[in-house]
Image (cartoon, coloured by chain):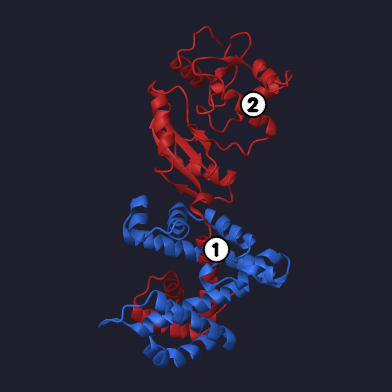
Amino acid sequence: MKREPCRDVSEEQVLAFVIGDMDPKSSLALAEHLGECRRCRDQATEYTSLLGGLQSCSAEEAIHWHQFETPFGAMNVAATDTGLSRVSWQQPDSETFVRHLASLYPERPAIHDTERLAQTERQIHEYFAGERSRFELPVDLTRLSGFEQDVLGCVQTIPFGEVVPYSEVARRIGSPKAARAVGNALNHNPVAIVVPCHRVVRADGSLGGYGGGISYKRRLLSLEGTPSLFSD
Amino acid sequence: MEGWVGRYGPELRRHLGRMTGNDDDAEDILQQVWVSAVEKPPDDGPGSNVRAWLYRVATNAALDSLARKRFSRRALQGIDPGAAAGDQQPPDAGFRGLDEATRARVREQCAKLPTKQREAVWLRWAEGLDYPTIAERLESSTESARANVHYGVKRLRESLLDIWEEEVER
């Protein structure tokens, strides 16, 4: 259903009026026109409604993201109002990362925000510089299954410099036979490094897998000074 | 203020009647305009334009009222009686009366806008930042921030129109 455009006033002018970007004289003329012209009035009503909808959104309903340099290359991070929800160095360009965010969070506009993620950036820098052994950042794991949340919650308690076998994590969360499922859950860790899934290894001492690439797991463990008895 | 009521009242009442198509609504909105004029009086010094200010406030209030009527239709039909209460809220409550589904749709469509437009629109309207601050955040000029808000909002309306029209037909 396409409506004929108004002959006297452009859509841009209607929009400028509703947005409040019009000088007083033009805005007076436009206000009077809206009284006369049904077409423009409908358009202005639609704009008013959608801007009202946006205004009623709070800033926290977005997903905020940021990118910064680390020894692993460009690090992309994203957070919801609950906490950090994404840590990734697999997508070096931010456009790919943002597209990925959009598919994960279709209801949250992705907004670049260095300030909201400044703490995250600082703590990750400190970690790589060997000045931090514990992250103090809220994380948002709400997109994960209950089992995955249990696994990652358990992994958060493994201290810096220590490693624990998959089977031990399974035992700690009360599913002693689920070592393989633990491995899968760790593979889906959306906030690597901050939730230290790299500290989970095989019972025989070998490294096991790592979603971010096995060489990175080795680098993280060596950064933490974990005894290098873990070969592949 | 008394002077304005006498001087501009009749023409504003007519204007609001045309805007809303309803004399009662027009009268209610006109009363809100006088309240705004007392609470946040316009500059009436030399060179200022009180009439333009009054028209602007009145027209925006009428558009708010039209938008609320049109886009909380489902709430008024009683599907969501909680949301219908929004209609009785004072005018300055803005769009909190808008039903959650409509709000979520606006946000979803905003999420689909191209990056610059999405960020400019969101920072301006959801976060309430001014253009210079948005320009700083986007590392662009103030003009480009403003242009991105305009393009983004225009595009947002286009994508929402299809959804709205479907709903009206239903």
Q: Residue at x 50, y 32 (%)?
A: A90
Q: Indicate the position of residue B141 as horizontal and vertical percent values.
A: 31, 57
State the SS at label 1: helix
Q: Which mark is residue A53?
A: 1
- The residues bearing labels 1 and 2 have C-alpha atoms spaced at a distance of 39 Å
- Asked whether B114 or A133 is in front, the reply is A133
**Amino acid identity at mark 1:** Gly
Q: Which mark is residue A151?
A: 2
Report how many numbered discs are placed on residues in the image. Answer: 2
Q: Residue at x 43, y 77 (%)?
A: B36
Q: Residues within 10 Å of mark 1 (few under 14, many from 20)?
A: many
Does mark 2 fall on the same chain as mark 1? Answer: yes
Chain to which mark 1 belongs: A
Q: Indicate the position of residue A202 as horizontal and vertical percent values.
A: 62, 13
Q: Is residue A7 visible?
A: no
Chain to which mark 2 belongs: A
